[in-house]
Amino acid sequence: MPDPDGLAADFEAMMQASMAKEVADVTLRVWTPQRASVRFVKQVAPTVEDLTGRRTQASPQAGDYPTGAWGAESRDYHVCVDAEPGTVGQEVLAAGVSLILNPASGP
């Protein structure tokens, strides 16, 4: 402990940060069409965290990646998908991404 005199203030700051979380359980859902697959999912801001190994199957073509509790903040993700190439000028859908709030967890 670097400064025992600051322990109470440190504890108070940690509790306020914990209580500032507005949503307790948020999941990033990544859907891919047939013949496409997710190579990796990473949170890249505000911290770097590889979520790939945390995937749970939501449906045959969708996987859920838990992101934990969120407060009033912004996060950035890097999602890499392997998809079959199309022809020049052809529009190809590689993935759909959404945030899922777990209503059972509450705020």
Image (spheres, rainbow, N blue to C red):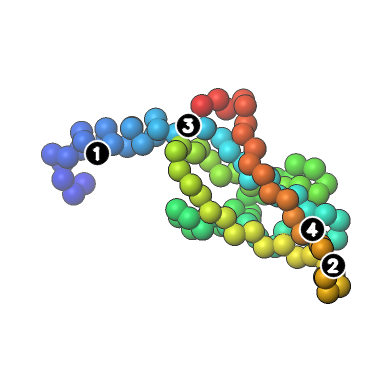
The residue tagged 2 is 90
Circles 1 and 2, Cβ within 8 Å, touching? The answer is no
| SS at badge 1 | helix
Please name which of the two marks, 3 or 2, marks the residue nearer to the observer: 2
The residue tagged 1 is 10
Query: On screen, 16 above or below 73?
Result: above
Measured in 3D between alpha carbons, the distance from the residue under mark 4 to the one under mark 3, in whole angstroms, is 33 Å
Residue 11, horizontal then vertical, whole percent: 27, 35
The 10 Å Cα crowd at callout 1, few under 14, some 14 to 19, many 20 or more, is few
| SS at badge 3 | loop
| SS at badge 4 | loop
Residue farthest to the front, as pictured = 89
Q: Does label 1 or label 4 sit earlier along the sequence?
A: 1
The residue tagged 4 is 93
Give the residue type that dot 3 points to.
Glu
Q: Quadrant of residue 56?
A: top right
Q: Does label 4 or label 3 sit earlier along the sequence?
A: 3
Viewer-nearest residue: 53 or 90? 90
The residue tagged 3 is 22
Measured in 3D between alpha carbons, the distance from the residue under mark 1 to the one under mark 2, in whole angstroms, is 56 Å
Residue 43, horizontal then vertical, whole percent: 54, 55
Circles 2 and 4, Cβ within 8 Å, touching? The answer is no
Taking 49 as reference, is 5 left or right?
left
The 10 Å Cα crowd at callout 4, few under 14, some 14 to 19, many 20 or more, is few
| SS at badge 2 | loop
The 10 Å Cα crowd at callout 2, few under 14, some 14 to 19, many 20 or more, is few
Measured in 3D between alpha carbons, the distance from the residue under mark 2 to the one under mark 4, in whole angstroms, is 10 Å
Give the residue type that dot 4 points to.
Leu
